[in-house]
Image (cartoon, rainbow, N blue to C red):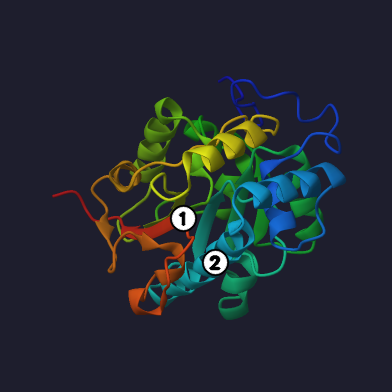
Amino acid sequence: MTDHSGVSFPGMANADTDPAGRPSSARIYDALLGGNHNFAADREAAQHLLAAIPGAGEMARANRAFLNRAVQFLLDRGVHQFLDIGSGIPTVGNVHEIAQRRIPDARVVYVDIDPVAVAHSNDILKDNPWAVAVQADMRFPEAILDHPGVRRLLDLGEPVGLLLVAMLHFVPDDDAYPAVERLRAALPPGSYIVISHGVSDTPSDAALDKVTALYRRTDVSTAHGRDRESILRFFGDADLVPPGLVWVHEWPDPADGDPHGMAVVAAVGRITPPS
């Protein structure tokens, strides 16, 4: 079988050539969160992103808070294993910390295309037997599902939390929809799919153009929001957990949110047995 782990998106420069000189989507996100697993090029890109979308830092923090709430929600429903695709760098407040604080042997596999993010992640996780990071490209879901790290830690016969948090807007339609469909199909009933996604009907066209140009210089080479109907397509026939697709900081309680300046939506869906 062809090994598609770690392959690049179309137009992506070799991420191994000069990781310190080329911004990475994972490390830009880390910079927005105030983390220290990033290079000067990532911090500069984060500043350009903030200039285009001043609320980008707030959105990153709201997205991280949503991840926390979603993982807690899944733990409450008996899900003790997680596949986090497009995970970036698992620094403070990420999935293994949230899950293992309550369930010490909760199992977490982080998947990212960026070799530097994966190397940082595995350094952080080196003493954690129940969490690992693997380098793979979500356009090739079979390579993820068959990866030895995934097979070692996750039992795909038991419910899994599939986390696609703030990453699908980096993947073109022709790749994103088939990949998510295949990943969703691999999950047993009782599993959940968790998505947050940039929505296209909030930022100005000028801001979108700047963001697109910025990410063209990174490892993913593209970034584009989708409208709500297009985002809901990723859930297929999964049952959306109330309140459905809402602003990322409103889930699961829309009464708590002020959508001013927000450009990210989120939802959680439950995989049910076929009818």
Quarter of the image holding residue 130?
bottom right
- Rendered image: mark on residue 62: 2
Give the camera-side residue of 189 and 91.
91
Does residue 237 appear left or right of residue 169 in this picture? Answer: left
Question: Residue 73: horizontal and vertical position, in percent?
Answer: 42, 73
Residue located at (76% from left, 52% from top): 122
Mark 1 sits on what residue? 264
Question: Residue 95: horizontal and vertical position, in percent?
Answer: 59, 64
Q: Does residue 145 appear anywhere in the picture? A: no
Crowd class of label 2 (few under 14; some 14 to 19; many from 20; radius 10 Å): some
Question: Residue 236: horizontal and vertical position, in percent?
Answer: 27, 44
Quarter of the image holding residue 270?
bottom left
What is the spatial separation of the Cα atoms under label 2 and label 1, in whole angstroms? 9 Å
Give the camera-side residue of 202 and 67.
202
Vertically, is 188 above or below 138? below
Give the camera-side residue of 222 and 48.
48
Give the camera-side residue of 272 and 169.
169
